[in-house]
């Protein structure tokens, strides 16, 4: 009925507008009423996702017009495809459309023609801004949009056929409410997800009008995932426009996004989302990884609908089935099924009661009446619980194994790796005697994690390889849970000094996760974080940085900038920046991670100790000792309170604080910390563990400061031997040992050895611009090789 021009408004505001006029010769009463109604509908609304009306009037030729916001955009589907937006970005954009439609409904306006060409998207800077336009066939629910009579003729289509709801297709105009717009939103949602319409528009127009209406009102479309998978060569195009492969698109759509689409497209509007805001709320639940309200219709509901459409056929079929099968057989089968379900439920109930009673008995030891005034620690509760498992559950191997596995994981989380190892090994042994036990793969994974912490990387790798075989056999080689085991193998390979294998494994884990969840899923970010650590360990700082930046973007987009999941990547990226010439930016990033954890965990949570230690150590490496000290001291207080002194995290912080105290000349306190860390690591981790090498290096640095050159040289040489035997020390530790040996040799006046160790340090990645001012290397000044290294550092 109208034509739209780009125009320039001169007064009272100079701006570009879209000017809509009635076409010449279209001034019938019905068209004039529609035009006036659209103008009034737009004037009622004020929402960023709805194009605004600025002015209205009549031209010199008597043609009504109104001037509205100029939207230099393209249809939402075209925009998403051109920008190759992933599923998550499409959902977030679509949420803003839902919000705009909800605003219209709150103003009493039903759009009745929601489709991609009426939802234009333009870029405003870096942000995509959707605008809903064309309220030319809008309907008011509780008010009159015009003083003139507005009516819809019987038999007149209002809306666009491919996007109209079943009740709209009846063409009476008498039974339309806001849920009709919800259906149209569902069609747009379906198209944004799968790349296709629920019903092929070309086919609809070929079959003739009565058949077209019947299909809209009765036929159920394929689910979006099914449609996306069945497009043949077009599947590749649809998937690539969403930044993924066809199988990954199918997996991401399957399930919750299918359910949301089919709920919005329900024929029976009482089963549809009641409003655009309800549809939007379910999408937000999906994005927050919460259960969605939508779900597939029950079988009973689908059966009732089928019977309504095929009453005569169903009746005849049912009568024949009853005559052939007989009621007795049906009742017998049903009775047997009921008995089986009852027995299964009774077994599960008995098992649950037994586990609950056992757990209650374990925690009785913390009751004041039982404890008799003594403080009972978590370790004591676990130890007493283990005694009860050994003595009371010998006749229940399944329950016994499940409880032992759980307690093994708790011991491991407390840093008590030896008892955790014993429990998990016993669990796997018991489960080997329980046919078809499904938890063996998970428990092998947990035992491998413990062996990794104990430094037995060979055993950890063999356990993970066995877990991988089990999980691939149970779930298939491309299942998302398989990626977790592959990720574990990569971590072990990195710790074993095999970064090449670690990188291959992590790249496989990332592919598996991208296929399962899509490229913008938080699970992908987790493996990207691990990949960045591998890249950094081999000196590929630029690749490590870009990988961590991608991980952070994914997590911030999926979960928000203040979510705890960003803490790990933020800390890792911050360390890289602080070591590579951007200390201020890196520090801000690490302080942000610290604030998030402190807000979420509280000021005394053990998880906070790691953040404080990382920030303190990074500041120490930049030479800002005064800023680093309070972070490291607070980290040590928190960790000792949470874990006691006999814990690897505690000794790690001790080492870092000892290094700081050495560099500011507080040798007695530094020496006490270094000796304590060395004794604890040797006792709980063994003298072949990389942490023991770290403690030896720290003690050697303290001894260099106190002038105990022979002891320093012996400890540093022993640290190098530990690294050579285990082949598990990272490049930074290897470089630190070599640099310590260079200082020791220089102090001992062994110029050749000092230069040799310095070359080793530089080859392992050592970099410190203050090298020329190091007093321990004074004898090397003036040596051409030393001067070349100093120039390189600068």
Image (cartoon, helix red, strand yellow):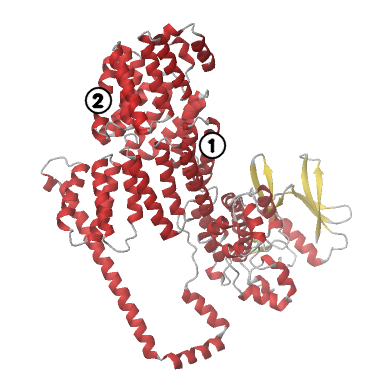
**Label 1: which secondary element:** helix
* Quarter residue 343 falls in: bottom left
The furthest residue to the bottom: 323
Q: Are marks 1 and 2 in contact (CB under 8 Å)?
A: no
Looking at the image, which residue is at 34% across and 31% down?
725
The furthest residue to the front: 752
Looking at the image, which residue is at 43% across and 28% down?
731
Q: Nearer the viewer, mark 1 or mark 2?
A: 2
Which corner quadrant holds the N terminus? bottom right
- Place of residue 248 in the rendered image (x, y in percent of width and height, measured from the top left): 55, 55
Q: Against 787, is 522 above or below? A: below
The furthest residue to the left: 372
* Quarter residue 613 falls in: top left
The disc at residue 21 is: none
Depth check, front residue: 163 or 675: 675
Q: Against 702, is 390 above or below? A: below
| Left or right side of 617 for 55 | right
**Label 2: which secondary element:** helix
- Place of residue 649 in the rendered image (x, y in percent of width and height, measured from the top left): 31, 33
Q: From where the camera sits, is residue 633 visible?
A: no
Depth check, front residue: 578 or 276: 578
Looking at the image, which residue is at 39% across and 49% down?
465
Q: Closer to the N terminus: mark 1 or mark 2?
A: 1
The Cα–Cα distance between marks 1 and 2, rounded to whole angstroms, is: 38 Å
- Place of residue 329 in the rendered image (x, y in percent of width and height, measured from the top left): 37, 88
The disc at residue 549 is: 1
Q: From where the camera sits, is residue 515 visible?
A: yes
Q: Residues within 10 Å of mark 2 (few under 14, many from 20)?
A: some
**Residue identified by numbered label 2:** 676
- Place of residue 53 in the rendered image (x, y in percent of width and height, measured from the top left): 72, 50
């Amino acid at each position: 009925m109208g034509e739209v021009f780009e125009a320039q408004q001169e007064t009272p505001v100079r701006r570009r507008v879209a000017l809509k006029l009635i076409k010449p010769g279209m001034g019938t009463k019905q068209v004039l009423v529609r035009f006036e109604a659209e103008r009034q509908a737009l004037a009622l609304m004020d929402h960023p996702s709805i194009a605004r009306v600025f002015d209205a009037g009549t031209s010199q030729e008597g043609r009504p017009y109104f001037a509205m916001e100029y939207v230099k955009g393209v249809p939402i589907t075209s925009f998403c495809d051109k920008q190759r937006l992933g599923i998550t970005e499409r959902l977030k954009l679509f949420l803003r459309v839902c919000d705009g439609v909800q605003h219209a409904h709150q103003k009493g306006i039903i759009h009745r023609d929601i489709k991609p060409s009426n939802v234009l998207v333009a870029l405003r800077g870096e942000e995509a801004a959707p605008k809903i336009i064309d309220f030319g066939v809008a309907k008011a629910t509780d008010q009159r949009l015009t003083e003139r009579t507005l009516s819809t003729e019987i038999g007149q289509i209002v809306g666009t056929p491919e996007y109209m709801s079943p009740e709209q297709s009846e063409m009476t105009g008498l039974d339309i409410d806001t849920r009709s717009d919800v259906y149209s939103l569902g069609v747009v949602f379906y198209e944004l997800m799968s790349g296709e319409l629920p019903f092929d528009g070309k086919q609809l127009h070929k079959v003739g009008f009565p058949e077209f209406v019947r299909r809209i009102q009765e036929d159920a479309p394929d689910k979006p995932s099914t449609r996306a998978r069945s497009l043949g060569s077009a599947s590749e195009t649809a998937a690539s426009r969403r930044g993924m492969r066809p199988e990954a698109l199918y997996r991401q759509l399957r399930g919750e996004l299918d359910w949301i689409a089919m709920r919005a497209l329900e024929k029976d509007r009482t089963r549809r989302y009641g409003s655009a805001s309800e549809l939007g709320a379910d999408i937000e639940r999906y994005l927050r990884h919460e259960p969605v309200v939508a779900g597939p219709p029950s079988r009973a509901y689908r059966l009732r609908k089928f019977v309504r459409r095929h009453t005569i056929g169903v009746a005849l079929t049912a009568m024949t089935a009853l005559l052939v099968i007989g009621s007795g057989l049906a009742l017998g089968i049903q009775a047997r099924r009921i008995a089986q379900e009852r027995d299964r439920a009774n077994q599960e109930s008995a098992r649950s009661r037994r586990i609950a009673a056992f757990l209650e008995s374990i925690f009785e030891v913390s009751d004041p009446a039982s404890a008799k005034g003594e403080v009972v620690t978590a370790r004591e509760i676990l130890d007493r619980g283990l005694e009860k498992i050994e003595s009371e559950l010998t006749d229940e191997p399944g329950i016994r194994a499940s409880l032992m596995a759980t307690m093994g994981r708790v011991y491991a989380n407390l840093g008590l790796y030896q008892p955790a190892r014993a429990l998990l090994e016993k669990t796997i042994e018991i489960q080997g005697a329980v046919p078809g036990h499904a938890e063996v793969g998970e428990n092998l994974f947990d035992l491998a994690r413990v062996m990794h912490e104990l430094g037995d990387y060979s055993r950890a790798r063999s356990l993970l390889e066995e877990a991988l075989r089990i999980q691939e056999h149970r779930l298939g080689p491309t299942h998302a849970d398989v990626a977790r085991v592959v990720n574990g193998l990569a971590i072990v390979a990195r710790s074993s000094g095999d970064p090449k294998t670690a990188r291959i494994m992590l790249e496989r884990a990332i592919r598996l996760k991208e296929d399962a969840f899509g490229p913008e899923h938080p699970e992908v970010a987790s493996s990207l974080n691990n990949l960045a650590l591998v890249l950094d360990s081999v000196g590929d700082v630029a690749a490590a940085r870009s990988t961590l930046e991608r991980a952070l973007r994914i997590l911030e987009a999926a979960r928000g900038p203040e979510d705890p999941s960003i803490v790990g990547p933020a800390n890792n990226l911050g360390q890289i920046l602080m070591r590579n010439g951007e200390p201020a930016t890196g520090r801000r990033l690490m302080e942000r991670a610290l604030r998030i954890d402190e807000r979420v965990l509280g000021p005394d949570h053990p998880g906070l100790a790691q953040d404080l230690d990382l920030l303190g150590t990074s500041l120490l490496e930049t030479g800002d000792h005064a800023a680093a000290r309070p972070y490291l001291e607070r980290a040590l207080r928190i960790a000792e309170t949470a874990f006691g002194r006999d814990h690897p995290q505690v000794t790690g912080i001790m080492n870092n604080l000892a290094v700081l105290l050495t560099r500011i000349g507080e040798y007695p306190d530094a020496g006490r910390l270094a000796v304590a860390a060395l004794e604890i690591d040797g006792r709980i981790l063994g003298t072949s563990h990389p942490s023991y090498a770290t403690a030896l290096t720290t003690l050697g640095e303290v001894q260099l400061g106190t002038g105990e050159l022979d002891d320093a040289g012996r400890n540093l040489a022993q640290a190098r031997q530990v690294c050579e035997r285990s082949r598990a020390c990272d490049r930074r530790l290897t470089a630190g040992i070599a640099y310590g040996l260079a200082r020791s040799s220089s102090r001992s006046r062994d110029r050749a050895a000092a230069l040799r160790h310095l070359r080793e340090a530089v080859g392992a990645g050592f970099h410190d611009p203050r090298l020329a001012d190091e007093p321990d290397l004074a004898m090397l000044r003036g040596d051409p090789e030393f001067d070349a290294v100093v120039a390189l550092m600068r």
